[in-house]
Image (cartoon, grey):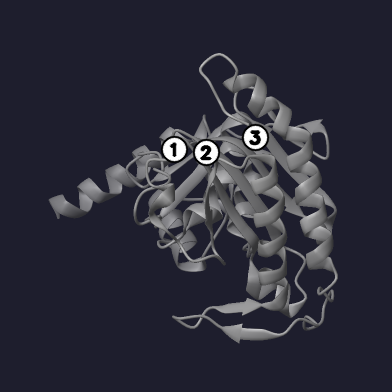
């Protein structure tokens, strides 16, 4: 499948159904190792740096590498569980995959984990799926075509007052944000970053915070879903994430509706300026 200027939109749209099917099949593979409320049946070991990886991560990654490569053979590949290579740099089409986002939740029996898949075109997400198998919920989006959860259209929360917003993320970041903004309602942290952003897209969370060192595979699919639902994610200065860089690592991020987001950035900028003035 070769993309030209004239057929790009058509070809991408044609991938939506098989991508959804692939995500569900990947989720079923992972579910075979998942034990709700109990430790996973999968073998567990540690990667460099100490983060855990399971037999399920590797199995899902292998399945998706084969399936997605069949769907789009010319696309490059970036995944949490595959050794990186330079082929993706400068590639027009890139699959970005997290076979299990929220591995620690998965291995402990917590249901908030997901399979996250994005397709980049010229370094921007144009297809995205975040599938939460243990919750039987699949979020998806195509650039310019809106966002859905289990086939139904979703939109971000209509909350316009920051002080009434529900906020999810690492507790130290929540505490700092509440000090700056005042009010806000702390919500339970969602272990999967992709699922955290998807819930902002669905209106279940008003504001989501992401600590530094998230990777492209944590964010790209959910970023598209959120934008198509009427929200956005950025760094703390309001700059959009850049994908498929040589080092696919991001700083601290904030996600919210298009109404709340600029107010959050303004609040954070104001707090920083006051700090410098003091």
Q: Position of residue 102 (x, y in %)?
A: 64, 66
* Mark closest to the chain's N terminus, 3 or 2: 2
Residue at the image position 63 percent from the left and 31 percent from the top: 1
Which residue appears farthest toward the left when viewing the image? 277
Q: Where residue 208 sits: x, y (%)?
A: 55, 51
Q: Secondary structure at mark 3?
A: loop
Secondary structure beneath label 2: strand
Q: Name the mark nearer the viewer: 1 or 3.
A: 1
Q: Which residue is mark 3?
A: 156
Residue at 35% x, 39% y: name it. 239
Q: Sequence-wise, which precedes: disc 1 or disc 3?
A: 1
Res 110 → quadrant: bottom right
Q: Residue furthest top?
A: 6
Q: Can residue 85 be spotted in the picture?
A: yes
Is 213 rendered above or below residue 269? below
Give the labeled residue for mark 2.
Answer: 120
């Amino acid at each position: 499948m070769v993309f030209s200027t004239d057929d790009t939109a058509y070809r991408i749209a044609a991938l939506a159904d098989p991508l959804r099917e692939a995500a569900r099949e990947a989720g079923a593979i992972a579910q075979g190792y998942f034990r709700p409320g109990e430790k996973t049946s999968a073998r567990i070991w540690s990667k460099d740096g100490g983060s855990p990886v399971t037999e399920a991560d590797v199995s899902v990654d292998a399945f998706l590498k084969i399936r997605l490569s069949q769907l789009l053979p010319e696309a490059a590949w970036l995944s949490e569980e595959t050794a990186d290579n330079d082929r993706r740099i400068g590639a027009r089409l890139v699959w970005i995959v997290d076979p299990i986002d929220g591995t620690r939740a998965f291995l402990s029996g917590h249901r908030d984990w997901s399979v996250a898949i994005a397709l980049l075109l010229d370094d921007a997400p144009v297809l995205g799926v975040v599938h939460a198998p243990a919750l039987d919920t699949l979020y998806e989006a195509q650039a310019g075509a809106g966002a859905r959860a289990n086939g139904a259209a979703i939109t971000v929360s209509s909350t316009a007052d920051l002080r009434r917003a529900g906020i999810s993320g690492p507790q130290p970041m929540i505490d700092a944000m509440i000090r700056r903004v005042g009010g806000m309602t702390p919500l339970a942290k969602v272990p999967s970053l992709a699922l955290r952003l998807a819930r902002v897209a669905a209106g279940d969370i008003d504001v989501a915070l992401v600590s530094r060192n998230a990777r492209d595979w944590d964010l790209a699919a959910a970023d598209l879903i959120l934008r198509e639902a009427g929200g956005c994610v950025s760094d703390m200065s309001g700059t959009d994430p850049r994908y498929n860089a040589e080092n696919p690592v991001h700083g601290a991020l904030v996600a919210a509706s298009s109404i709340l987001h600029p107010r959050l950035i303004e609040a954070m900028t104001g707090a920083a300026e006051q700090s410098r003035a003091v």
